[in-house]
Amino acid sequence: MIRSHLQFLGMVLQTSRIFSLLLVSSAATLFVVVSWGRLSRNISWTALARKATHTGEDSLLDSGSKFGNIKGNSGPPASVFTTAQKAKTDQTTASTHAAVGETPMPVLSRESFGKLPQWDFEDVYNRDAPPRHTACAQSVQNSEDESFRKAFLPDIRLFMHKDDINMSEWNRLSHFNNPFGFMGFKYDDVMASVKLIPKPKEPLLDTKPGGDGCVRCAVVGTAGILNGSRMGKEIDAHDYVFRMNGAVVKGYEEDVGNRTSVYVHTAHAITRSLSLLKKYGYSSAPNDEGIKYVMIPEGMRDFYWLEGLFKGEKVSAGQYHNKQPRMYYGGQYNESRFYVLHQDFLRYIRNRFLMSATLNTSSWAIVRPTNGAFTLFLALHTCDVVSAYGFMTEDYKKYSNYYFERTTKTSVVFYLNHDYILEKNLWTKLHNSKIIRLYQRADSETGTEELKPH
Ligand SMILES: *[C@@H]1O[C@H](CO)[C@@H](O)[C@H](O)[C@H]1NC(C)=O
Ligand SMILES: *[C@@H]1O[C@H](CO)[C@@H](O)[C@H](O)[C@H]1NC(C)=O
Ligand SMILES: *[C@@H]1O[C@H](CO)[C@@H](O)[C@H](O)[C@H]1NC(C)=O
Ligand SMILES: *[C@@H]1O[C@H](CO)[C@@H](O)[C@H](O)[C@H]1NC(C)=O
Ligand SMILES: *[C@@H]1O[C@H](CO)[C@@H](O)[C@H](O)[C@H]1NC(C)=O
């Protein structure tokens, strides 16, 4: 499998970056704050829409490359490579007697890689999700944008569940750092939780009866642009409203709406928001009747969280040890309305749409799209028509970091683990290609027209 190594990374910013300021501490994590210098707004999907062969799983498993090969010459440090090679040899020997993939591969360590490793199956994803049939002519699935069509995988598996992971899958996913896989995690630790994840009984969203067959969704981020926007009514008029992270609603309805149909979160977001956002009136995660909860399993702490949640017990280990997960969902936790995003889906979004230049640095392992980006792509895969509100826009400097910071103007904080400028440019591009509608203020510098109600 020879593919041009990292070619698709070329799409990202040709930028001069200035790493400045340090250290904002958030719970257990230390992030480096970065301020970005000049940037190019010119990004394209074509560069990254590499040939997506669907032969992936089979060739991956059948070729015996259960322990993956690094693409190109720029492999990882010798120690890791040796481990992987040795493991592969052992496995080859073993597999003459037993079926491939009966034991977990040796644990790879993120510290062994000086930048994002590129495996020859990097761009191979679990794609056996039932395709979404839509009668909607304007559906994003019917987009005529050539580069988007190439990058977009309508059949990618969105959700992870207990029947979907066997040893081959475990070993494949163990090559990717979290949240894109299980690198550095122990099989027993993760599987204690994964084996409890129920198979979703129904698709995340249904087409509303009596309509024109189009599923219309609003995805509401937390950006300051929403303050004073009076977009609440328009947001609520969608079939479904997605929110994520610190989704403060009460007291802000006029600007952000009052409905939440899908709430996307991590264990960190659902616990920390309570204390951090209390002063803005936030007292619970959204808990509308019948709400769907979607979890981004971003780290081991989320798997411990899930285990406690599904068992209805306290978290047994990790950062949220002894917390009662079920208490955080405002009485609306219900196993049949709970979904866990699949590592392949998260990696696909990074690889094909948001490949940050920072992945080429030693900080690679913490760099990933924001939860807002993951949520917007979840909507693009489950809705026909998607409007994004409260996402970063070209004129972001005019607004507070968050919409609920309305009394004092704050500035957008750039953490090294997210590439906000890359995301901002992607939202603009998706908007200009009519793939999403990005809410922008009429008075914005770019002069882009304000969204009109449907
Ligand atoms: C393991 O699971 C994957 C994904 O569901 C599937 O494609 C593959 O056939 C399974 N392999 C075995 C040996 O069952
Ligand atoms: C949202 O507000 C509308 C009135 O503007 C009201 O009819 C509806 O019940 C509210 N929904 C929720 C979930 O609070
Ligand atoms: C959980 O949600 C499903 C689907 O909405 C519903 O049919 C079921 O009654 C709910 N269970 C409980 C215990 O509320
Ligand atoms: C990452 O580095 C490789 C060479 O090592 C280069 O080809 C690629 O363009 C770089 N990607 C980014 C996004 O800077
Ligand atoms: C938020 O919006 C209100 C109403 O438009 C405005 O008075 C206030 O100055 C805004 N706050 C910030 C921080 O921009």
Image (cartoon, helix red, strand yellow):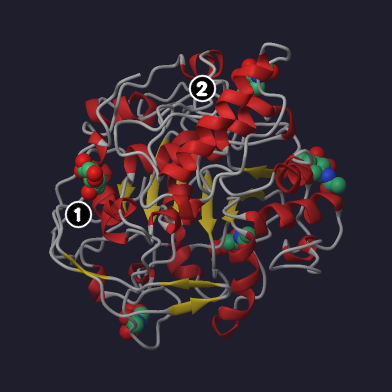
Towards the viewer: 47 or 451: 47
Q: Residue 94 bears which disc, if any?
A: none
Q: Residue at x 25, y 41 (%)?
A: 9
Q: Position of residue 330 (x, y in %)?
A: 74, 64
Horizontal side of residue 312 vs 77, given as left or right: right
User: Is 144 placed left or right of 266 in the picture?
Assistant: left
Q: Is mark 2 within 8 Å of ligand 1?
A: no
Helix, strand or loop under label 2: loop
- Give the vertical position of 35 relative to 94 (above or below): below
Task: Give the mark nearest the N terminus, 2 or 1.
Answer: 2
Q: Amino acid at mark 1?
A: Glu
**Which mark lies nearer to you, 2 or 1?**
2
Q: Is residue 20 above or below residue 151?
A: below
- Residue 230 rendering spot, x and y as whole percentages: 39, 67
Q: Residues within 10 Å of mark 1 (few under 14, many from 20)?
A: few
Query: For the residue marked with disc 2, what is the amino acid?
Result: Ser
Q: Quadrant of ligand 3?
A: top right
Residue topped by disc 2:
65
- Position of 181 relative to 103 (above/below): below
Disc on res. 449: 1
Outermost bottom residue: 408
Query: Is residue 326 among the parts visible in the rendering?
Result: yes
186 on left or right of 220: right
Mark 2, other Cα within 10 Å: few <14 / some 14–19 / many ≥20? some
